[in-house]
Amino acid sequence: MLVGDVCAFMAPLGIALEKSLPTRGREGLRHTHDTMEQAMATPYLRDMIGYGPNPPNPQWPNGARLALNFVLNYEEGSEASFADGDDYSESTLTESGGQDIQGRDLAAESMYEYGSRVGFWRIIQLFQARHLPLTIFGCALALERNPLAAQAIVQAGYDVCCHGWRWEKHYDLNATEEREHIHKAIASLQQTVGARPLGWYCRYGPSVNTRRLLVEEGGFLYDSDAYNDELPYWVVVNDRPHLVVPYTLGVNDSKFGRGVFATAEDFLTYARDGFDLLYREGVSQPKMMSVGLHMRLTGHPSRAAGLERFLDYVMTHKDVWICKREEIARHWMANHPYVS
């Protein structure tokens, strides 16, 4: 029902009620009616509807029922640390769960180092052994500090979606700082992996300026700074179409760091249940599924075992497109171009 229809429907009721009220009541009713009409006519800044009950058929390659994208977050070496002039040591998503330690936290630092020294190699070996693609959410400064990992990413043909210059909270940056950090990240990745990033994903969430700055920069195909859908969608930013490929904190090993998952079986059960449901739905409504991984979490053997079993499980299913995030974006742009 349109705003005009609602107002037309409510008008007779309002008139009848107004006649039955004393003057003060009539004035209050008129004020309420005017306020409601004004509120309904004001554009809402959020989209609570999306595709609704009838999402488009994504037409995944070869008629796949599900597009499955694995994401490895490469953050270690770009987190807050005394070595980079910060006044604290980042301990988020580590075995310690975040300690309130004043001064340098050497334990937390070493847990991050485990991710780049050990976890990275274990995880990519699981994917390489199965000839599966992988998307890297790469913090630029972190990859600068591990040239061997950057080289391995290039040699494997993984796509790198920029995860920021550092693993930092973009919503704490002003627009000038954020613009500078975006450009520094692009230049850095061009040096470490030989190509500019085509996708973007902030730590946890963007600022109110992030998407505008990405579109302003002009070289990004998409961003993943949203959790609100299971299919890509278009938005308009400053009169320019921009593609969003939503991410997830659902099937995401960050639940280990928050105490939701305890064992590899917890991760496997959660990921497998989500996969199974989307696979069944994919007969009539194909979707996409993201799986988020962190080197300092899933890189541990007791957790990597769950990932290993999940990879083997999904590979027993036909009509599943296991793909890179950039491939999803390019597919959507080619098969579902923006329509004004």
Image: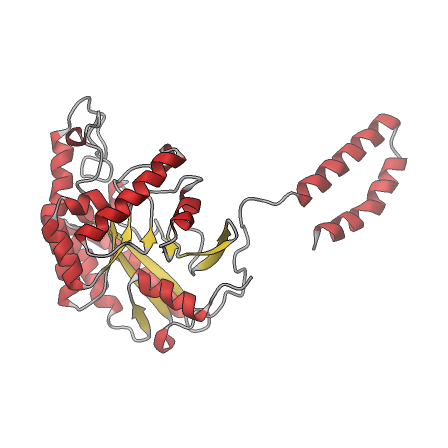
Q: How is the rendered protein coloured? A: secondary structure
Lateral position of residue 43 relative to residue 34, left or right: left
Q: Quadrant of residue 30?
A: top right
Give the quarter of the figure containing the C terminus.
bottom right
Task: Look at 34% across and 66% down and name the residue there.
Answer: 67
Farthest residue, direction right: 19
Q: Quadrant of residue 207?
A: top left
Residue 24 as seen in the image, left or right of residue 37:
right
Task: Tell me which residue sits at (51%, 49%) in the image.
Answer: 238
Position in image of residue 197 (x %, y %): 29, 54
Left or right side of 100 for 128 = left
Q: Is residue 41 above or below residue 101?
A: below
Q: Residue 75: horizontal and vertical position, in percent?
A: 22, 44
User: Looking at the picture, how far across and down is residue 47, in whole percent?
Assistant: 53, 50
Work out whether 2 lies above or below 92.
Answer: below
- Foreground pick, 140 / 248: 140
